[in-house]
Structures are given as C-alpha cells and as structure tokens.
Amino acid sequence: MSILILNGSNSQSLGERIAISLGLKFENVKARIFPDGETYVRIESQVKGRDVVIVQTMFPNQNDSLMEFLLIADAVKDMEAQKIIGVIPYLAYSRQDRKFQPGEALSIRTVAKLMKSVGVDKLITVDTHYQHVKPGEFDLFGLPCINLSAGRLLLEHINEKVSDDLMTIGPDLGSSQIIKYATGEEKIMRKIKKCPICGLPAEKCKCKIKKKKYEITEVESELDFNDRNVVILDDIIASGKTMTQAVNKVKSEGAKKVVATATHGLFMKDSLIKLKELTDYLVVTDAIYTPVSNVSIAPLIVEVLK
Ligand code: R5P
C-alpha cells in the first residue's frame, strides 16, 4: 500500500508539493487550538497498514507545532500505521544540544524521547543545528535521522537571480557545515569578542570579568571582497545580528553586490525588513514560510522518500 502524506498546519504547502511530486495521496490534518491553549487534531484518511509521512516544521510556535506533531504521530500509531516518518525541516530545540551550564535541560534529547515514545521511526530534517551534523544519517538519542542540506539549492537560485560570478562565505563558525557542503570550501568569517574594559580580544584579556560581558566588536576575514558579488550563507537567521555584521563587513570592504541567504529564516523582530534594506537580495527556503522563502526544499525531501 502506498505512502500517505499528512501535513501539519505549519507545512501544508510544502507537504502538498512533496506529495504531488511523488504522486502520493495527502491530507492537511485538521488541527486547531482550543480557547484554553490546548491542541486538537483529527485524521480522516485510512491509515491502517500504511507508511505515514508527517510533514510539520517547528517554527513558528515551536511548542504548539511539536505538540501537534506528537498528537498526529500518536493518533496514526493508534490507527495502526506501519511506519511513521517525520519530516521536520526546522527541528526546534536543536541549539540546546548540550548542557552549557549545570542544571540545564538537554532540550533536544527531550524532543527525541517524546518522538520515540509516540512511535516515530525516523526523522528527516534540513540543516539542523544539532551538533553541526554533516548531511547524511545521524542518531538523535536513539532516533534514526537524516540531515539534508539546502545550501546548493540556494546557491543555484542566486546564480540565476543575481549573478553567476559569486564568492560564497559563511558569517561565522556555526555556518561551517552548510558552507563546506554547498561549496566544498570552508570560507568563513570569525567573530572577535573584546573586553569592554581593556579592549583586548577575550583570549588575551586579564580583566576576569564575566564572559557574557564580552561583546562581539569585530568580524574578521582574510578574504578580498573588493568588487566581488558576495553571498553570505548561513543555516539560520534568527535575530539577524550575525548576518547583519557579516553584510556590513563585506560592504565596508568594497563588495559589489551582497546577497544574504540561509536555510531557515526565523527573522525575529524587524530583522527581515532591515536585512532586505541592507542587501541586494535576501532569500531563504520554505523550511519555514516567510515572505522571502523563494527556494523550496521539496526536491531534497522527495529524493529521500522516492
Ligand atoms: C550560529 O552558530 C548559527 O549558524 C547562526 O549564525 C545563528 O544562529 C544566527 O543567529 P542570529 O541571527 O540571532 O545572529
């Protein structure tokens, strides 16, 4: 029996694209939030004996989206689905992938435990921040996962839209995995944190003030941006601070055109408007829907589900 695609409320058009490309049946799951904040879901398709793919990205409203995903998975397990595959392009809580301070929750492990407990067999995600894993298979606390990378799709789109003469660079260390996979090179910038008292870089300072007081005051790069079309590629744009610093750096060093791009556009506060104004082109994928999600990750998912 064929695969059934069930779309959560955050990823209906992505799920539809995937289903149509594969010639599969799909259902946009009925989901709503009760006035008291609790989530309700209902699946109408025949599920018994079928492999079910649940497509639900986890932004916006990370907690509600996670709960909706868990309720759908649990319901289809009850309805005797054979296998449950979660397609979660933006896997929330991936940044809390270790205990940075004593007493903290290892949040991504909790998410993995919950998914396993409702019968999820496998996850497919895209450019997850979790331990900066490479594209390919990885283990999320006992839950088999596949990480895909959207960097090449973004660069192909930018090649067509802006120019085919591009220099691609990552804005910081966190972008090294996506950059390496998309370009084969590790051209990344380095953020320098300086002490607010003596002005020395954090590693040379002897003032012994609290670490969080060290502000990022400089972005370093040995590359020559003069007269080049520069693409700054990252996995996530959240507050937009990292991207803004990188854009300002390449502009101040004479770049011709500057493109900002990332797989996941969270765009907190007014960062989307500000980055649009600051750059020649801004584009992200539909892993999260935004007004600049002009690249679809559907082909990546389709390849895996074929
Ligand atoms: C960092 O390691 C990541 O690759 C991103 O650069 C970061 O999450 C972006 O966050 P923000 O937009 O808040 O600077």
Image: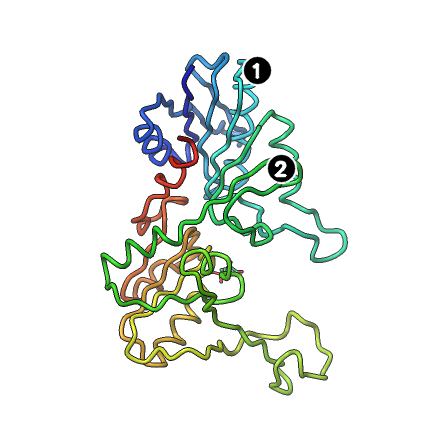
Q: Is residue 298 left or right of residue 194?
A: left
The three-letter code of the residue at mark 2 reads: Ala
- Tell me if mark 2 has few (under 14), some (14-19) or many (20+) residues whose alpha carbon lies within 10 angstroms of its own: some
Is disc 1 placed on a helix, strand or loop?
helix
In the picture, residue 194 is in which quadrant?
Answer: bottom right
Q: Is residue 245 left or right of residue 191?
A: left
Question: Residue 157's spot in the image, x, y percent?
Answer: 28, 54
In 3D space, how far apart are the residues under numbered discs 1 and 2 (Cα atoms)? 20 Å
Question: Residue 239's spot in the image, x, y percent?
Answer: 47, 60
Quadrant where the N terminus is found in the figure: top left
Query: Going 49% across and 61% down the picture, which residue do you hit?
Result: 175
- Label 1 sits on residue: 78
Query: Going 52% across and 40% down the picture, which residue do you hit?
Result: 146
Looking at the image, do the residues carrying marks 1 and 2 touch, with CB atoms under 8 Å apart? no
Q: Number of marks in the image? A: 2
- Label 2 sits on residue: 112
